[in-house]
Amino acid sequence: MEVKEILEQVYDNFLRVARRKSKNKTFDFPRVGFLNDKKKNALEECLGISIGNIAIFEQALVHRSALQSLPEGTISNERLEFLGDAILGMVAAEYLFYHYRDNQEGELTKMRSWLVNKRSLALCARSLHLEEFLLVSVSAKQSIQKGNEAILADTLEAVIAAVYIDSGIKFAQNFILRILIPILNVAPPHNANYKGRLLEIAQGLGYEAPYYVVRAESGPAHERVFTVAVMLQDKEIGVGTSKTKKEAEQLAAQSALETKFSDL
């Protein structure tokens, strides 16, 4: 048995004792009841896991904005978010450490930041359809529909903690890697900030800063799609389309970099 496996067993045993000592505490995971059997099955299918203690996942899906309409004693997902953030950082760091052996600390840090930033986590959350299960206020729901990344990102971290508590570190690790690692293939970390890179090039060439113009909006209110053009010297040099203006701007900048400044 490898040292890593021994340490994992020791850690798991330590946590079992800690959980046993606190299993009767009221702060553990009081049942809310909004995830019935049908929703539980749908959530399992979206997450690709089996749920043992549904109360843990209910807490992971309760945003603080919904507390005023829930029974007294209901707990939001913020504590789970705290734990999930730590687990996420550790798993991402370990994966990058072993799979990018030629990269130095600075490069690995950038890659980890790309994996665990709000935008990446929100992208994963949407791919898992977490917004369909999240309990939020009307105003918070509207904020999500307008592209709010923080609420969904925080929810995903809480769900990661729920998977960990419910099934253990191995299941949490597999869950994280399954949903996050594909992001590395979407856009390389060093090119993630296309707007920043385009601005640097424009300034280096003596131009004024690029600016962005919304060319079109389409779709219903809860699923708006924006088409944005990036302008340089009053000429359109790139176009991007996405569900948020911010992402559309990034895609427009990426288009400009690939078509107009690919040699820089």
Image (cartoon, rainbow, N blue to C red):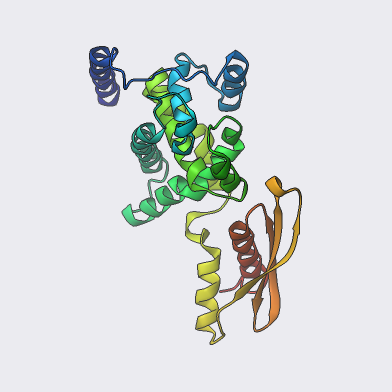
User: Relative to 81, is 216 on the left or the right?
Assistant: right
Quarter of image, res 104: bottom left
Where is residue 134 drawn, in percent x and y?
A: 54, 32
User: Relative to 195, is 242 on the left or the right?
Assistant: right
Where is residue 141 drawn, in percent x and y?
A: 58, 41
- How many numbered dots are placed on residues in this image? 0
Quarter of image, res 45: top right
253 or 59, nearer to the observer: 59
Q: Residue at x 46, y 46 (%)?
A: 115
State the residue lying farthest toward the bottom. 206
Q: Quadrant of the N terminus?
A: top left
Q: Is residue 194 visible?
A: yes
Q: Quadrant of the C terminus?
A: bottom right
62 or 82, nearer to the observer: 62
Where is residue 226 drawn, in percent x and y?
A: 70, 58
Quarter of image, res 229: bottom right
169 or 126, nearer to the observer: 126
User: Relative to 60, is 36 on the left or the right?
Assistant: right
Q: Residue at x 57, y 29 (%)?
A: 133
Where is residue 56 drawn, in percent x and y?
A: 43, 21
